[in-house]
């Protein structure tokens, strides 16, 4: 087989990608991006791969979360801060429940392109191309707005660079101090009169107090006040991905410089397609969404193409089936991985299979359905004797009303209050933290069961 080149995907069938009408304008943008600095570095991607390998072995746990689709008009420092803040809170709770390090990966600084179920949409008898994310076209329902514009890639890069810069500052500048983060979590439990959450929060506080008494504080321990935070997105727009791909001088391998981790969606996982071809050649850890139509044979072929050397941490399988369907579909995929002896990290995405249309006309996700899929995911892995390595949520740090349910009981009538997403409904800060407490309970229960088996 000839050596992989970053443009090889252009010889493969492409799906879910725009057809740019102005080839000269596209070429000019790609050339400009090719001269820009990468947004991430190869050493960071290799470190993340090691952490994901640990999650696959049960020695760490992945928390991946963030926007459905980042937008240009809602971009703000406060928005980045709020999502980062909630993810730190979630990680704190998960660390306590799992008793292992939590790997924090944002759906941020690159999550601009979205696959669509249909190439066009019709409103009041008018048919136009679908909105595919701000990196491609615009949400406004006009013919001009829906034309793919390559200049948008430059704006996406600029926004992604600013996001990465702020995330690095938050991660190392004292904002992530463990005791400070936990005070935010306590604020959640004070607002909600829910005893089991309060009990966990109190136990975490006892641990922090004990460490402080032992002299372990932000002033004395670097790890207490800083965090590692990584970026990820769906590697959908391959012109953008190729333009930011760089040769790593240390390893001689290619790095997708657009983000630490990229994933392949359920609609673009064709083994001989353009997206698999691109992702198989980069050194970054790769995610693969696995839906109800993924067969065991599909998965075996994809694992061999995306991770031919069977590296730990290289391939993360992100299960997204829908409430009640994980029990039906996940076991066959788990068995396929076992049969191949493949090293993978199993992650649960309980969002994408649980989207419905509410009676009020809004696209939403019932919190109970999200929760059920998480529980089913853990149940299957417990039955199969395999390791649930993480969770993947579409969420925001803002107080939106997009998913129904949760302790604050968002109703279908409430959806119109603060429904801000351009694509899919996201968990708000309260729902995200509530779900995390429940995941922590599952992890704690699994650890207790493992301890009992070992003791026996």
Image (cartoon, rainbow, N blue to C red):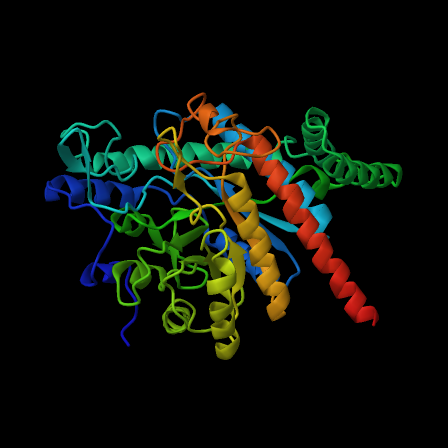
Relative side of 43 to 212, left or right: left
Residue 95 lies, with reference to residue 153, above or below; the image says below
- Can you say whether 173 is above or below 417 in the image? below
Residue 394 vs 264, above or below: the answer is: above
> Quadrant location of residue 416?
top left
* Residue 310 drawn at (x, y percent): 48, 72
Q: Is residue 239 left or right of residue 367?
A: left
Of the pair 171 and 401, the residue shown nearer to us:
401
Task: Give the x, y percent position of residue 454.
Answer: 79, 70
Question: Which residue of the protein is positioned furthest toward the right in this rendering?
Answer: 213
The image quadrant where one finds the N terminus is bottom left
> Looking at the rendering, which quadrant does residue 364 occupy?
top left
In the rendered image, residue 428, in percent from the top left (x then y), is placed at 53, 32
Rendering coords of residue 173 (x, y %): 62, 32
In the image: residue 424, left or right of residue 229: left
Question: In the depicted view, which residue is nearer to us: 45 or 342?
Answer: 342
Q: Quadrant of the C terminus?
A: bottom right
Residue under the point 50% across and 79% down: 339
Residue at the farthest top position: 417
Quarter of the image where one finds residue 220: top right
Relative to residue 41, is residue 69 depicted above or below?
A: above
> Viewed as shown, does residue 411 lie left or right of 161?
right
Residue depicted at x 63% and y 30% = 175
**In front of the other: 154 or 16:** 16
Which residue does the image show at 53% across and 52% down from the upper left?
A: 373
């Amino acid at each position: 087989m000839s050596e992989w080149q970053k443009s090889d995907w252009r010889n493969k069938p492409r799906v879910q990608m725009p057809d740019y009408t102005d080839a000269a304008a596209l070429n000019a943008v790609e050339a400009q991006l090719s001269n820009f600095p990468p947004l991430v570095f190869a050493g960071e991607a290799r470190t993340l791969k090691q952490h994901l390998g640990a999650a696959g072995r049960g020695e760490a746990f992945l928390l991946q979360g963030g926007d459905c689709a980042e937008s240009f008009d809602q971009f703000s420092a406060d928005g980045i801060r709020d999502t980062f803040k909630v993810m730190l809170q979630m990680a704190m709770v998960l660390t306590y429940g799992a008793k292992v390090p939590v790997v924090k990966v944002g759906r941020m600084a690159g999550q601009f392109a979205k696959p669509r179920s249909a190439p066009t949409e019709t409103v009041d008898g008018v048919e136009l191309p679908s909105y595919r994310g701000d990196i491609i076209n615009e949400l406004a329902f006009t013919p001009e707005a829906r034309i793919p514009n390559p200049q948008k890639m430059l704006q996406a890069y600029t926004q992604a660079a600013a996001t990465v810069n702020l995330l690095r500052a938050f991660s190392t500048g004292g904002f992530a101090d463990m005791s400070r983060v936990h005070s935010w979590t306590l604020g959640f439990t004070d607002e909600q009169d829910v005893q089991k959450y309060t009990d966990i929060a109190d136990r975490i506080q006892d641990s922090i107090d004990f460490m402080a008494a032992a002299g372990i504080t932000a002033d004395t321990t670097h790890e207490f006040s800083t965090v590692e935070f990584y970026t990820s997105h769906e590697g959908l727009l391959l012109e953008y991905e190729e333009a930011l791909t760089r040769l790593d001088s240390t390893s001689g391998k290619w790095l997708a410089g657009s983000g630490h981790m990229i994933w392949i969606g359920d609609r673009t996982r064709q083994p001989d397609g353009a997206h698999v071809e691109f992702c198989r050649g980069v050194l970054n850890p790769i995610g693969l969404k696995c839906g109800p139509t993924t067969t065991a044979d599909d998965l075996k072929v994809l694992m061999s193409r995306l991770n031919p050397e069977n590296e730990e941490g290289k391939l993360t399988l992100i299960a997204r089936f829908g409430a009640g369907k994980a029990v039906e579909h996940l076991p066959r995929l788990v068995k396929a991985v076992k049969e191949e002896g493949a090293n993978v990290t199993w992650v649960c995405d309980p969002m994408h299979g649980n989207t419905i249309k509410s009676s009020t006309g809004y696209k939403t996700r019932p919190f109970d359905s999200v929760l059920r899929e998480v529980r089913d995911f853990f149940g299957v892995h417990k039955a199969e004797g395999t390791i649930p390595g993480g969770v993947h949520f579409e969420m925001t740090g803002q107080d939106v009303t997009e998913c129904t349910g949760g302790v604050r009981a968002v109703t279908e009538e409430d959806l119109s209050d603060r429904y801000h997403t351009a694509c899919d409904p996201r968990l708000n800060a309260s729902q995200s933290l509530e779900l995390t407490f429940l995941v922590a309970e599952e992890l704690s229960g699994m650890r207790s069961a493992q301890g009992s088996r070992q003791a026996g």
